[in-house]
Each structure stands twice: as C-alpha cells, then as structure tokens.
Amino acid sequence: RTEEPWRDFNSSRVYLADLESALHHSLRVELALQSVIKGNALTALKAYISVLAKYFPGRPVVMNLLKSLNSWLQNQNEGPISYEAFRERVDNTAQVPDAALPEGVRWVGCQGSQPHFRRYPCGVWTLFHVLTVQANNAGGSDPKEVLNAMRNYIHNFFGCRYCADHFENMAREGLEEVTTLPSAVLWLWYRHNRVNNRIAGDLSEDPYFPKIQWPSPEMCPSCHTVKYNGEHTWNKAQVIPFLGSYFSSSHILTDYLE
Ligand code: FAD
C-alpha cells in the first residue's frame, strides 16, 4: 500500500474529514461484512441511519445522500435486506441529484503514527460525541435516541468484538441514568474516559497520542477542580458547555475535504 502523506492538524479541533471517513468505513467496509441484514441488526441499522440523517453535521451533498438512504431504508418493512441493495443507495446508483458520500478515507485529527493506530475507532468516538451534541442543540425529543442507536450499531456491527462487548456492558449498567439530552452528552464523555483509563498503556495505544482523562487541564482549565484534600474532580457544570462548543457543527473544521 502507498503511504498517505501526513496531514498537519490541530489536536484540539474536530475535522469533518474524519467524520466523513468514519461514515465511509462504516457504510462501505464494516457493514459490507454482512451479506444479509435482518431482525435486530436491521432495526439497529435503521436507527443508526435515522440518527445520521437527523444529526450528522454534513455538507449538503452528504446530507442529501443520508436522507435518501434513510427514506429508502425506513420503507424496507418486509426485511431482510441485502447489503448489495443498501450499497446501491450508499453509492447513489439511482443518481438522486446532488447526493454523494465521498469514497475512501482521509484521516486528519484521527491520523495515527502507524497505520494500525487510531483511524476508524477514533472516528467512531468522534462521530458519536458529535451526534449527542447535535441532538442536544437540536432539542431532540428522546434523550437516549443517539446513545441507543450507537449502542445497537456497536453491538451488531462494530468490527472490534471485545470493544463491543465492553461497551455493551457499560451501556447495560448505566444508560437508565440518562434522562435529559445534556445527560446523554455527559454519559458518553464519562464512559469514553473510563475506556481511556482502562486501555491506557496497552499495545493498542499510539505512543504519540497517549490516552488521557479528557479534556486536559490545558484544554479546559475550568473543567477540573482539585478538592482541599488534593483529590481531582470534574466540574460537570463546565464540562457540558465545553463539549457543546468543542463538538458543535459551527466549530468543526473542513480542511482536507475532497
Ligand atoms: P480515541 O479514544 O479514539 O478518541 C478519539 C478522540 O476523541 C481523541 O483524540 C480526543 O480528541 C477525543 N476524546 C478522548 N476522550 C474523550 C472523551 N472522554 N470525551 C470526548 N472526547 C474524547 N480499544 C481497546 O483496546 N479496548 C477496548 O475495549 C476498546 N473499546 C472501544 C469501544 C468503542 C465503542 C470504541 C468506539 C472504541 C473502542 N476501543 C477499544 C478503541 C479505543 O477506544 C480508541 O478508539 C483507539 O485506541 C484509538 O484511540 P485514540 O487515541 O485515537 O483516541
């Protein structure tokens, strides 16, 4: 394989190129492993595509593709569906005007120092943080809509199976505490930090991108509080607006798009 050139990036920003790359990998690579999609997996796919069509902060051409894919998929009442039929909609072979999902990946903020580091799993986390924040900003009616869609996508399709099992365990034990849209944003942030903590120092960690309890004090000083006994706590009242701004659509960078 030819090495991709390194793309300079700001490590405290979100890039649309990573989100589109995650979509490409999810819809054209990960889902392609299922030749037929039915039952709970089909229900999970419908919820995932519906959430993307509602909350993905994409360019108009990508949003048109997601909306056309969603309206086709929601009409597949009979099930099962073949991946081939799904893929035709992803590739827009019916040529809906001004609708496309770019082919291939261009990792930017999710680049790794080696090809086996970061990339898609980083893109998945980033995508789902963005979706919880967009749902919060849009005032969605079901606080768990995005988290349930994500949980079921991961459970049915995510390629790293032990990651999926860990995530399912976390979701099983804690999702009922999510009762509002801001608490959904916080839930995902908090659980992601638990994963960071669990896998810090593992072989899967890119040495150039060590796992931290995120955001660092440099990124968000007011998110951190040190108690009188020296113990660290999060100032959640500050974390919510920080996440809201960090992952908001108006703050996402569009460098390196095709
Ligand atoms: P990632 O953890 O992928 O994070 C991406 C970016 O999100 C970071 O660069 C940072 O900018 C931001 N970020 C970091 N923490 C937070 C936070 N708390 N809230 C908001 N934003 C944050 N790997 C394993 O080895 N074992 C596992 O069990 C495992 N489970 C996984 C479960 C899921 C659902 C997913 C999506 C991935 C899992 N992975 C697991 C992969 C692992 O979590 C990382 O995605 C991978 O190691 C790449 O790490 P990264 O350095 O790119 O940062």
Image (spheres, helix red, strand yellow):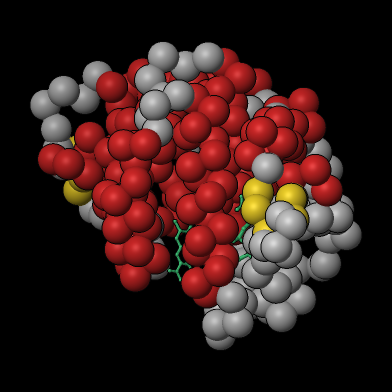
Q: Is residue 37 above or below residue 248?
A: below
In this picture, residue 114 sits left or right of residue 144:
right
| Percent x, y of residue 141 | 41, 14
In this picture, residue 29 sits left or right of residue 237:
left
Q: Is residue 162 above or below residue 104?
A: below
| Percent x, y of residue 82 | 22, 43
| Residue nearer the viewer, 105 or 123 | 123
In this picture, residue 27 sits left or right of residue 139:
left
Asked if one can make out residue 158 in the rendered structure from this viewpoint, the answer is yes
| Percent x, y of residue 244 | 68, 31
| Residue nearer the viewer, 79 or 14 | 14
Q: Is residue 235 above or below residue 198?
A: above
In this picture, residue 214 sits left or right of residue 80:
right
In what quadrant of the picture does the N terminus appear? bottom right
For the point 53% across and 55% down, which residue is it? 192
| Residue nearer the viewer, 242 or 5 | 242
For the point 40% across and 33% down, which residue is it? 178
In what quadrant of the picture does the C terminus appear? top right
Quarter assignment of residue 4: bottom right
For the point 14% across and 32% down, which residue is it? 79
| Percent x, y of residue 185 | 54, 36
| Residue nearer the viewer, 177 or 231 | 231
For the point 59% across and 30% down, which residue is it? 133
Q: Is residue 128 above or below residue 179?
A: below
User: Total label count?
Assistant: 0
Quadrant of the image where one finds ligand 1? bottom right
Residue ranking furthest to the bottom: 203
Asked if one can make out residue 22 in the rendered structure from this viewpoint, the answer is no
